[in-house]
Amino acid sequence: MKKILVPLAEGCEEIEAVTVVDVLRRAEFEVVTAGLREGALVASRGVTLVPDVEMTAIQPLDFDAIVVPGGYGGVMNLMKDERVLGAIRALDQAGRWVCAVCAGPLVLQAAGILEGRRVTCYPSAAGQLTATPRVNERVVVEGRLITSQGPGTSMAFALEIVKQMGSASLAQRVASELLA
């Protein structure tokens, strides 16, 4: 079973976090949400989310992938957290999957893994993306790096993760069950 880490921080984008978790769990991947601190957090639109664990409990190489949701406030908080940046670096160096949506690629940039790679992000975050130019596509797969543009592309993003980490038939089954 694939094991996925989703770090969550105050100000994250609800649609991106919850859609990814939901779709990956429907694909029967083990998904662990990790907060930067213990307890509930408030996402960008005021929805309260309760992470499964705190980041201090995470061993990055126990995971097959990390998925970074966007939401500008959440991204700014994730970019300041060395545990998150270290997990991204460790998974990337180990050839595991690294995924980010919306402004989330800015966290990948802060971790130093974007140079020379094709990525997309939320259009207003593109000006801060200095390691590589933004590709204007809904979802971009570059080796074991998957990026997407924002809340409206979250379902396609999550299904692409299922396709790449599982199979096209698994992604198709999950999409069919979701009427996507």
Image (cartoon, grey):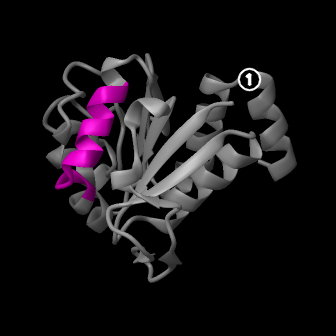
Quarter that holds the N terminus: top right
The x and y percentages for residue 56 are: 33, 53
Left or right of 3? Residue 175 is right
Residue that appears at 51% across and 57% down? 16
- Residue nearest the observer in this picture, 142 or 53: 53
Residue that appears at 15% across and 31% down? 131
Q: Which residue is most to the front? A: 57
Name the residue that disc number 1 marks: 168
- Above-or-below relation of 131 to 45: above
Labels in figure, total: 1
**Could you tell me the amino acid type at mark 1?**
Ala
| Magenta part, dominant SS | helix
- Residue nearest the observer in this picture, 123 or 7: 7
Would you say residue 179 is visible in this rendering?
no
Let me know if residue 74 is in the magenta part.
no
Left or right of 74? Residue 58 is right
Would you say residue 14 is visible in this rendering?
yes
Let me know if residue 83 is in the magenta part.
yes
Secondary structure, mark 1, is: helix
Residue that appears at 34% across and 24% down? 92
Residue that appears at 24% across and 38% down? 86
Q: Which residues are magenta?
A: 78-91
